[in-house]
Image: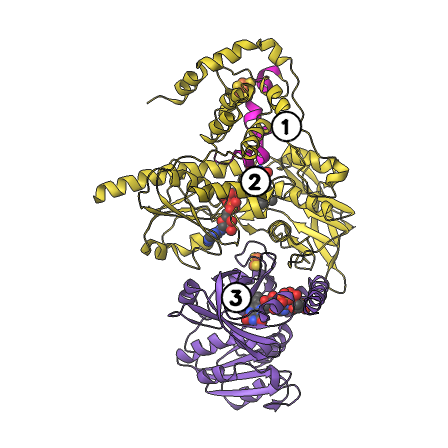
Chain colours: A yellow, B purple
Amino acid sequence: MENMVEHLARERSMEWREALRKSIKAKDRTSLERVAMPEADPAERAKSHVEVNQGLSVQMAVEESRRCLDCPDPTCIQGCPVSINIPKFIKYIEKKDFAGAARSLKETNALPAVCGRVCPQEIQCEASCFYTLKLKAPPVAIGHLERFAADWERKSGKMFIPEVAPANGIKVAVVGSGPSGLAVAGDLVRLGYAITVFEALHEPGGVLKYGIPEFRLPNEIVDVEINNLKKMGVEFLTNFVVGKTATIQELKAEGYQAFFAGSGAGLPNFMHIPGENANGIMSSNEYLTRVNLMNAAHDDYDTPVLLGKNVAVIGGGNTAMDSVRTAKRLGAERAMIIYRRTLAEMPARNEEIKHAQEEGIEFLNLNNPVEYFADKNGRVNRIRLQKMELGEPDASGRKKPIPIEGSEYELEADLVIVSVGVSPNPLIPQSIPGLKVSRWGTIVVDEKEMQSSVPELFAGGDIVRGGATVILAMGDGRHAAAGIDRYLQKKNRSAS
Amino acid sequence: MNKIISIEHLSENVVKLSIEAPRIARKRKAGHFVIVKIGEKGERIPLTISSSDPEKGTITLVVQRVGVTSHKISNLHVGDSVTDVVGPLGLTTHVEKFGTVLCAGGGVGTAPLLPIVEAMHKAGNRVITVLAARNKELIILEEEIGEFSDEVVIMTDDGSYGRQGLVTHGMEEIIQREKVDFAVVIGPAIMMKFSSMLTKKYNIPTVASLNAIMVDGTGMCGACRVSVGGATKFVCVDGPEFDAHEVNFDELLTRLGGFRDEEFKAYQIFLETLKKEVT
Ligand SMILES: Cc1cc2nc3c(=O)[nH]c(=O)nc-3n(C[C@H](O)[C@H](O)[C@H](O)COP(=O)(O)OP(=O)(O)OC[C@H]3O[C@@H](n4cnc5c(N)ncnc54)[C@H](O)[C@@H]3O)c2cc1C
Ligand SMILES: Cc1cc2nc3c(=O)[nH]c(=O)nc-3n(C[C@H](O)[C@H](O)[C@H](O)COP(=O)(O)OP(=O)(O)OC[C@H]3O[C@@H](n4cnc5c(N)ncnc54)[C@H](O)[C@@H]3O)c2cc1C
Ligand code: SF4
Ligand code: FES
């Protein structure tokens, strides 16, 4: 079989690619400036939920695509967790075959419209682009182009729905409808399997729906992907908690031959400091779920959400940034990030930090809460903070924050969102006897097949990695789908 | 969609409804609850499964009207559907043969108490149940509770039915009269607080079923957190039943009021729109 390098070389040597390469000199390509993403005005968007990045126009996208050199050794691909054939889709854009670009993205990425919006390209493909590595210049805007191609396809009204093989009657259950589950479902339904996706909440989509806000990832985009899967024959059963409504063993008895657990890392961590259970202190999961999934900020929806004048969000990840920017949009006068390290160590995407700064979010770095105080009704009104300084790097490679003795002071806050990480959802692991889990409660799988210690159970995404990214979850799903297919082929061969 | 098979108004503010939910009906045990949502724009609220019929595939819920969602439920009719029902959630009641079990239900807390009374009875315990409410109107499920109790004591605040007095009076009389090995208390947080202070005084192991505010019911949000024995627990996955003597009821009481202003405002707006629809 052809290996990856040969495959890429063959595709690169196609006539149309050669012709495009010759049409503009490399020197002229590298002298082009990176096209800036049009953004909603910071003052306006901080009051609404419009998407911040507005997307490239056709003209902008084609112009940006010309910068890509179609390198003989495309280092960008090594930076992509699912090895998207990046120059290929970009050259389709240069050729103005946008449908072709979308189709070639979908060869490896089931959710390009999502990944084009939320992937941390700046530390993945774009970090290993020739421009970044060799020219010390801004990389090709791979993420913006990915989003462009996927959006173009969606808006064209002619979305490519992959062909589905004849039904083979083999039932596979997918637990959880986040990116990993959606990827498994998409790949297996194409091979002819009968797929049921079980989702605990009343709407499918996982974190893409209940976590990431509209202004970064409109729900409609996720819904389109889910509807395409439905058109391909995937069945979605919402309001179904596997392990509670039915166990894996019971579903097995109902004829499901293999299982994929993509149940995510849903359990919010708290800091367990005094006063943390006061009213007005909640996890980012609660806050974002109320606002994103339950539409709590709209009067005609029944779910309430607390509004704050001085909102403090504890943490420095994407979740913290999404929460603080949501609070600003819901009318906070001060919306503050409280983080125990500095901007340089913040795990959130650079783009999110930049957007937050533009929107007037305050960053109280090198600060850590030690206690909360409440008013006579039990609602939080003040935080006691301690200043920190950075010491030697810790196990994670980041400089360790060390409290400065005697530096405590108090800050007014009437809403506090705790965003200090999540733990794996224990429901699935607990309900399966004999399943091997790690010290942290993640499901242990073999990395290639994504198979757990229970042969018919495969797993991927945050329940395996303990908190990762959309693209890694999606990649896991694709590997697991291949693993499940091989497992079932083998099993059914030996049975017949 | 879960169709409503029957609906019965137990008192002015309490309805009992049985709805289609075949999988839940088969799986549920005492202690389990469901989360329901009414309409596309509805909120998710937890309700105990009061009983079920696995054959017919139905579960029974008993709901007290206190705000927007419970009001919407009380206005439903046979043939309507409940938009979303998910469960059974939570851990099951720990049932064993304790000897004599004292069960106390306050107000609509009688509904979640019913499956426990039944399970305790079936495990061979002597079951004595105290039902308490403000007045006669609000005493519910007396007959069903009676079926599985060796004795039922009714207490009303105004003496309009049974004996006059608080639930704790009824409980204390029984504790003084005979040896009680285990107690279960379910009702408003304030009632559970005082009932468990009483059983603590007599060293009777006691569980309480906590009615924290919830969103997802699967451990994902932490809205339902309570302090038990100094540690933070999530009612939806670690409960809803806990050692009553370890629960911080004052914190629970405060947290139940966490959205009071928002809920009050929403309910006023809802009642206004109801009025407009009528006229
Ligand atoms: C606020 C926020 C912002 C983020 N921003 C980014 C970003 O910008 N870029 C990025 O790459 N990543 C981001 N992430 C991380 C990314 O979203 C996750 O890594 C990814 O969604 C994990 O996917 P998953 O498939 O493992 O499951 P999830 O998306 O976590 O979905 C799991 C689903 O399984 C369901 N479930 C759980 N248990 C059961 C059960 N027993 N039965 C049935 N269903 C069950 C859950 O309800 C849920 O819907 C963000 C995360 C959050 C919370
Ligand atoms: C595990 C569990 C099981 C429950 N079982 C039942 C049941 O079988 N029958 C039943 O009628 N109720 C039950 N409850 C309580 C029920 O969930 C609430 O009454 C309901 O959420 C109120 O919603 P609402 O929109 O009608 O009122 P809201 O507008 O939300 O609230 C109106 C008033 O009720 C108070 N309130 C809100 N939530 C709760 C709560 N969770 N507990 C007590 N008071 C609350 C508010 O402080 C407010 O004053 C249970 C709660 C839990 C956690
Ligand atoms: S490394 Fe950069 S320039 Fe080269 S092919 Fe990839 S995106 Fe294009
Ligand atoms: S209701 Fe969300 S964690 Fe319990």
Q: Are marks 1 and 3 on the same chain?
A: no
Instruction: Indicate left or right for A194 with A327 as reference.
Output: left
Q: Quadrant of the C terminus of chain A?
A: top left
Q: Position of residue A270 (x, y in %)?
A: 61, 52
Q: Is residue A88 left or right of residue A3?
A: right
Q: Circle 3 sits in a helix, a strand or a loop, which is it?
A: loop
- Nearer-the-camera pick, A156 or B18: A156
Up the image or down, B65 lies above or below A276; here it is: below
- Asked whether disc 1 touches disc 3, contact meaning CB atoms under 8 Å apart, the reply is no
Q: Main secondary structure of the magenta part?
A: helix
Given the image, on which type of amino acid does mark 1 rest?
Leu
Q: Looking at the picture, how far across and down is residue A39, in whole percent? A: 69, 32
Residue at the spot of label 3:
B80
Q: Is mark 3 within 8 Å of ligand 2?
A: no
- Mark 2 and 1 residues: CB-CB less than 8 Å, in contact? no
Q: Which residues are magenta?
A: A110-135
**What is the three-letter code of the residue carrying label 3?**
Asp
Residue assigned mark 2? A221
Q: Identify the subunit bearing mark 2.
A: A
